[in-house]
Each structure stands twice: as C-alpha cells, then as structure tokens.
Amino acid sequence: MADSTSKPRSFQEIILRLQTYWAGQGCAIMQPYDMEVGAGTFHPATTLRSLGSKPWAAAYVQPSRRPTDGRYGENPNRLQHYYQYQVLIKPSPPNLQELYLGSLEAIGIDMALHDIRFVEDDWESPTLGAWGLGWEVWCDGMEVSQFTYFQQVGGHDCHPVSGELTYGLERLAMYVLGIDHVMDMPFNDPDAPIALSYGDVFRQTEQEYSRWNFDVADTDVLLRHFEEAEAECEAILSQHHDDPKTGKRIIMAHPAYDQCIKASHIFNLLDARGVISVTERQAYIGRVRALAKQCADAFVQTEAGGQAA
Amino acid sequence: MPDLLIELFSEEIPARMQARAADDLRKRVTDGLVEAGLTYAGAQAFSTPRRLTLAIDGLLAESPTVTEDRKGPRVDAPEKAIEGFLCGAGVSRDALEARDDKKGQVYFATITKPGRPADVIVAEVLESAIRNFPWPKSMRWGTGSLRWVRPLHSILCILTDDAGEARVVDMDVDGIKAGDSTQGHRFMGAGWFAVSSFEDYEAKLKRAKVILDAKERADHIWQDATNQAFAAGLEVVEDQGLLAEVAGLVEWPVVLMGQIDQEFLELPPEVLQTSMKEHQKFFSVRNPKTGRIESFVTVANIETADDGATILAGNQKVLSARLADAKFFWNNDLRVARDGMGDWIDQLKNVTFERQLGTQAARIARISALANDIAPDVGAQPDLAQQAARVAKADLSSEMVYEFPELQGLMGRYYAEAAGLPAEVAAACEQHYAPLGPSDDVPTAPVSVAVALADKLDTLTGFWAIDEKPTGSKDPFALRRAALGVIRIILDGGYRVKLDRFIDAQLLRHKISLNHARATEGEIDTLEEILDEIAEHGVFGAAFHAVMDRLQHKGGAPDTGDGSVLRTVGNLVPDLSTDLLAFLHDRLKVYLRDQGLRYDVIDACLTLDGGDDLALIVARAKALSGILATENGENLVQGFKRANNILTQAEERDGVEYSFGPDPKFAEGPEEKALFTALDKAEADIAKANAAEDFTGAMAAMAAMRPAVDAFFEAVQVNTDNQVVRRNRLNLLGKIRDICLQAADLTKLEG
C-alpha cells in the first residue's frame, strides 16, 4: 500500500486506510455484522454497546441495504446495497472532531485545499428509539459523513455519551478518486493483474436485487417472517435470566436483538414492495421500536451493559 | 471601571441558533450583573459557528454596599421571637435599636450588605447563565452532565482595568476552567493565543482568520457576491434568510461563483433555486438579459493556494448530481403531465388527507363541487373553476413535489401548462394555496379565487365537522390561517359572497361522507337532495325542512327519530355553521383591528344582513367608524343609549316590549312632534341608503336624528303619570332603537 500522504487509488484502499487509521487511534477493528441491516448503526457494536457505562471503541465496515434505493445499477450515486464505515467511541473523546479530520487526511483529503464544514444535522432513528445531536460533514459542499453524539438509544439515556461517525463509503471514495459513476470506480488497484471496478463486483447484484426488492419478493412470506421475528424476539426476552442447564445468569439480549434487526429489514423490504400504507407505516415502525427498546432494556442488565458480574 | 470579555468556545453551533444565542447570553449575563448591583455602560454580543462572545464595558468594579432597616418584634416580645429575629437578620443584640411604632416600641436592625468585587459576581452570573442557557435543543457529551448545544471546550472570561491590565475571572464549570485564551480559524488559525481586552481579542481573531461580527461577515458575502456577479454581467438573487444562514456557517467567508451546467438550464428557475438553496446553501445568480438562473454563488470557509478552484469544482460536481436528480424528476413528471395527469389524480385516491376526512381524492371532489358553486359570485366560469379544482392538487403525486414539498402549486402550474390546460386553470394550480401568510399576496384571477376559497372553506368546514377546532395556542391544521385567507381574498377582491350558503353546503358534504358507512341509501339520497336545494333556499335549515315536507307529502318519509342520521345531521349542521361563522367573525375582528377598526364597531355591524357577507360588514363598519368620529355621531350614540336604557328598564318593569309604533296624535309639545318628523325622515333615508348600500349615507341619516333626540330628552319627561302618553313615548323610544338598528347595533358599542 502507498504511504498515507499520497492519493489512494481504489475503493478498497480507502477502506484499508480508514481501518489502519482508526486502529491507530485505539479502536477495535470489528468485522461487519452477519445480518442484513439498513445502516452501520444497527450493528450491535453500536446500538447495544452505546448503552451502559462501560467504555467502548470500535470501528468497522458495515454492508447496508436500503431496498427502496435500488436503481438497477444505473444511477451514478444510488444503490440498494452499499458500505458504511462506522466508528463508535464511548465516552466521546474531547478531540473527536480532530480525530475525524485526521481520518479524512488519512484518505488523501488535504485540509488546506478543501472546504470542510460541520452543518447542523440532528440524527434520529424512529425504529431504534434513538436520537442524538451532531452534524453532517461537508467536503466542498458534499455530505461525506454523519457525526453524532448519542443522547438516547432504545429509550435509554446514554451515560456516558458515545460519539458516532458514519462515512458513506462509496460517495466519499468517488469524491476522493474523482469518479462520476459509482460503477466506474476501481474496486482494487487499477494496475492489478485482474483490475476490478465497482461495477464488475456489484452491477449484476444491483440489478438482481432491484428486481427482487421491487417486484418479486413474496410479501405474504415477508409479512409472516415479520410476525415470527417479532414473536421470537419477545419469546427470547421472556425467558428466565437464570439458565436452568448451566445455572448461570444468561440474559439473551443479542439473540433477541438479532430478531429485532430481522424485523427491521423485513419492514424495509415490505416498504419497497409498496404494500405498507402511510398509516400502517407508523404502526410497523412502532413495533420495531418496541422490540429495540426491550432489547436495550435487556442489554443494560447484562455485564457488557454495565451490570456488575 | 473595568471591561468584561466573555467567550464560550464550542464545537459548531447550528447557524439558525447563533444570533438568538448571542442575544440570550447578553441578556442573561447583563440582567444577572445588574440584579447583583453591577451596572455597566454598554454590552455587545457576537456569534460565529464556534463561539458566543459578550463584551461589556464600563462595569462597576464592585457592587455598592447596601444598608437596609429591618423591622423586628416589639421590645416586650418573648425572648424566643427576638432571638429568631436576630438570627434571621444576622446581627447581634447590641446592634438592635428600639424605635417608636404605632403599636409601641419596636426593635429595628440595620443590616449592611457589603459590596462584592466584580469578578466574584461575574463568576456566579456566568456559571448560572451557562447552566440555564435556553438552547432550543441541547446535549451532553463524554462523561459529563453539563448541557450545551454542542460540546463546550473553553471559557474565556477576563476583566480589563483602566490601565489595560487583564485579569482572568476565577471560575470553573464542570471542569472547564476560565482562562484568557482562545483559538482562531479551525484550519487557518495557529492554535491558542491569549488576549487582554475586547479590542485585542477582535484584532487577534481577525489575524487568525475569524471575523467576529456576523453582520460584517454577511455584508462581506453580499458585497463580494454582487461584485463578482456584476463583473460577469449577472445579478445575485436576493435572499436575506439564506445570507444570514450562510454567514453562520463560516468564520472567514470566501465567496466563489460558478456556472450551472448548460444541460440544466431548461429546468424551471424555481427548481434550480430551491435545489441549490435547500441542499447546497448556494445563492442563485441570474442573467438579467434572459431572466434565467445561470450561475451560483457558494461561500467557503477557507482561503486556499489554488484560490478555491478545488472547492468550486467539488461544489459544481455535487450540484450537477443534484440537478441530474431534479432533471430526472422533471422529465418523468412531464411525461405524466402531458398525458393529462390522470395517473397522479388516480394516485391521490390512496393518499389520506386526514383519517376521518378521507383521501385527497375525496377532498378534491368536494372542493371542486364547492368551487363550482362559488364561481358565479366571484366572476369565474363554473366549469373552469371545477376543472381547476380537480387538477390543482395533482402535483402532490409528482416526483418533484415529493422531493421538494415547498414547490407544490408552482409545479402544478408548470404541469398544467404542459398538459395543455387553459391558462386560468394552470394559474389556479399555483395560486389556490395563497395567501399563505399575512403578508402573502391574495389571488385575484376569478378561477383562482373560486378554487382558493373552496379549498379553504372545505378545510374549515371539514375540521369543524369532526370537531377539531383550534384551541388556545393549538392550531395544528392552520385553521386560523385558512380563515384569514378567506377573509383577505373576499375583502381584497371586494367580492359579494353570502358565506352561509357555502358553509352549510360544505358542512353537509362532509357530513354525507362522514356518515356514508352508517347511513342507508335512502338517507344519503335525502341528504344529497337537501344539498341540491341549499342554493335555492340560501341556508341549510330551510332546504332541510323543504325536503322533509316534500317527503312527508309523498308518504315515504325517512326515519327522523332521535339518533337517526337525518335528525343528527339536521341538528348539527346549523350549529356548526353558526359556530364557524362566529370563528370567521373573530378572525375578521383581529384582522381589522390591525387596520385600526375597533372590535365593538365591527360587532355593531355583525348582526345585520345575516352577518355572512364580509364585504358588507366591513363597508358598514367603516361607515360607522367614520360617523363616530363626528360630533353628531358621538352624541347620537349617547342619545341612543339614554333611550335604550330608559326603554330596557321600562320593558323589564312592565314585562312588555315597546315596539308597537308610537302615534303622533299623542305627541305634546314641539320637541316631541319634531322627533316624530325626524324619525320618519331618518327611517326613510336609512332604508333608501341601505338599499343602495350607501352606508355612509345610512350612518349620516342616523346621526342626523341627533338634534331632535337631544331636544326631546331636554324638554320631555318620558315617564309621566299619564299612562297613555308614557306608553306612547316608550314606543317612540322603541322606534329610535329600531331605526338605529337598521344602520348598526349601537348597543354593542363600548363606552
């Protein structure tokens, strides 16, 4: 890999530099969560770990799915599957803004040449029962990141407060690499023996998923899955905290939260299929939020959630 | 006397909150200082994205010593009471002084509160200001519990004495210790520096590439932008709100002008403007020769070695991506529009307007029925008004309006034009929303007026029908604005509209759809029949009874028993209608008060002519207001009130109403006879003037009775022993009241 002061040459190099940078700042570099989510925030390393009193520092790439944004791979900027880079540090360090700016420099953005701005943007996730204050960060008029101080997650006040950074990787990389259409972006090194573009990797899948998301996904099955995930989540959380087999206290916050994630993604799919009316929409969001709250309630009773073992 | 400098340095404060926050800081701190006895000569507050600054000059170095005499118990009071007083006053026994009081000898204590140095007071006041700051939204960060709009990093707080010597105020808020240092620009500044006074602070900030004063930043932006535009033969589209916002996004404004890609110039200018403003905070730059928006101005926060070339290129690229979206929406929308917008209108069947009031499609059907009814009264062709109402909200389904809701109506006009609809119809798509605010223009084209009135009346009657009227400060459906819209459109256009009829009809339309589920087919048919007859009878009540009578005669009378649909609707509509008209009257009074017409003067004119013809009410009220300013008018009111008082008392006592009409043959004396003559003349003149809608004439005719009325009261005793004469005179007073009531209800006047 080239040294960090030079311009990166590919999508993956930008990711690798971010990984190296945040590892250097002491973050645990985690791997993507192995489930379909709408954004990096849904990863339990953010949602659950932002709760409770225990310090935490993690960074990871999270593949994210937004079925309604599918454009069959034709739109230069819109994808139904894309990558977010997520950083969560609890408590938020006093120099988080400087750390963030350092990460932009690490991927080749020269602070003396570009116009970086912190523009008010309060973040709220109705499905997670979460909100925070912060900014969208602009680079030359383009939104390149979300910067949020979490105030509440799953209905719980955040104490201490986590600082969350979310980078939209494709958009950021396209800007840094000077690419106009996402599919034209070099995925690996353009001089590699087998040079691959973003389109080589994802054009076909964008087409396939766009078709499935919009027209084919079986809505009856999805509706049933939603109900099942909801029921399973509640069933998991209703179990006794003491496990009869091991005799240990095991609150299954994470397995329950998996079901919450599942319900949330199924809701997004149903939304893309256009079978949810405006009024129903609120009701579904409320149901997912109720699950997220119960998971948060459970997590704060666990050791990772700050309870004495 | 020392000067005080405070700076609260934080992460980026939202632009929209900065000016207000600077003002709050100034107010809270100066109020606190004054309350603690520290007066000052002047105070100025400033804001940038990262700091709030307050500079106070001529502050007292310490608060003055205050002495206070406090009255205690009597000298012979129990020991416990005296001790309690000593404790409370904080003085010793020998400091007490016995003085004579009304009730005997009483102890007085003289309490001296010594002055306190300014820095101690400043520390207290500033800490309290920070902890209780009224941010619209605030947050915590890290492990702390302090709340600020974004993390607060440092507090600069110094007192500078006359010799220019600066001293840091000793204070600490949640671990942030006040100092004398700050930072300049995030990228162009060179770290921390100390300051010794406000002048030193402002100058050093400027060297560190921060312009402290938001106004100075805004002026710089505007001047530079207009200069650059002028040099290119262009002009910047003025936008004060955007200018203020942009000035709050930068500490060191650098103005850059760029061109919009040729391929986007075909977009409507409003789309370009909205897209650039909402997403990018760009100013639009117009070519005065073509009237088109061709360029943009963006404001960066940094000077760069390439003179902003990279920044401008980046911004241009983002803009092109945004406008590519807008162009995509525009082209898709035009396809639907050219096909007659049928798809959009169909889609509105699936969009809920309000849970009880049904879909947008149902709403549009009601509005077009009402627009059709109203059209003749405002000089519009009914079929055009109906057509306009049907398409006026079609653009709500368009992609452009989904992306930019603020373009609703405007896009409607473009799309109606693309659909080849008549110009009046296209104009109504845009104008039927107006007026949106008290200073917004009202529509004047007849078709637009018909649809605008129908739209607003449909909203008002709808929320009245489901009992969702505004209460107190709660008006979630902006019904006051709708009512004001109706009033302004009617008055500005001078339209003669009897609102009762339209309100009744629209209430009934709502009731029909609200009852659709529970009513029988026959009941709905009957209600529809009543609806058809309202125009003929003028009001709901008469139409209701006419239809009921007819059905009775036919023998097929539907159920009108207690709780039946017809009975409920029949009872409700007149009450709701009266209540809504009263609401319109209230808004009318508020509106006219702002134009200098008194409440009571309007009240005096509401009861005439049914009170539903707003133009008539206002014409009458203006005439009455005019006559009240004359001597005759003012005195006539006094005479009227005298007559009315005597009359009301007599009527109460006698239990009759004196309205039989007096007989001149019982008149005694010239004054009484003269009054008969004057009243007859006034009655005839008022009737004639009223018929010609000459209200000034009517008021003048009424006021002309004044000498005769005055002379009558001067010479004649109403309550005489002769009962026949007395009754006749009371009837004569009754006639004064009746005649005046033809012009205005003077009993409503105050004072």
Image (cartoon, coloured by chain):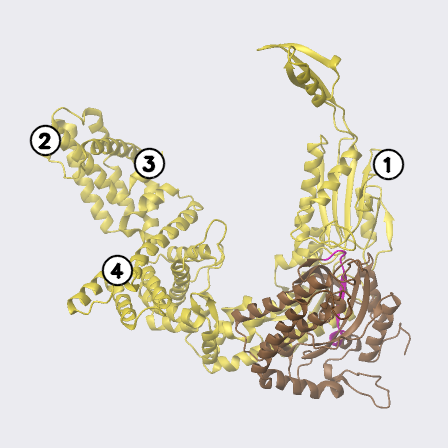
Chain colours: A brown, B yellow
In the image, residue A156 lies at what x, y percent?
69, 58
In the image, residue B62 lies at what x, y percent?
77, 29
In the image, residue B529 lies at what x, y percent?
26, 69
Mark pair 1, 2: CA separation: 98 Å
The answer to whether dots 1 and 3 both sit on one chain is yes
What secondary structure is marked by label 1?
Answer: loop
Q: Is residue B437 above or below residue B1?
A: below
- Which residue in the structure is indicated by mark 2? B666
- Which residue in the structure is indicated by mark 1? B165
Of label 1 and label 4, which has the lower sequence position? 1
| Magenta residues (range) | A158-172
The answer to whether dots 1 and 4 both sit on one chain is yes
Q: Which amino acid lies under the numbered mark 1 shown in the image of this protein? A: Glu
Instruction: Name the front one of labels 1 and 3.
Output: 1
Instruction: Name the front one of labels 4 and 3.
Output: 4
Q: Nearer the viewer, residue B348 or A285?
A: A285
Q: Nearer the viewer, residue B321 or B66?
A: B66
Mark pair 4, 3: CA separation: 38 Å
Q: Would you say residue A221 is visible in this rendering? A: yes
Q: Which amino acid lies under the numbered mark 3 shown in the image of this protein? A: Thr
Instruction: Name the front one of labels 3 and 2.
Output: 2
Look at the numbered discs 1 and 4 and tell me whether their residues touch, using CB distance below 8 Å: no
Using the rendered view, name the quadrant where residue A158 is placed. bottom right
Q: Residues within 10 Å of mark 2 (few under 14, many from 20)?
A: some
Q: Which amino acid lies under the numbered mark 4 shown in the image of this protein? A: Gly
Look at the numbered discs 4 and 3 and tell me whether their residues touch, using CB distance below 8 Å: no
Using the rendered view, name the quadrant where residue B82 is placed. top right
Mark pair 4, 2: CA separation: 43 Å
Of label 1 and label 3, which has the lower sequence position? 1
Read off the chain for label 1.
B
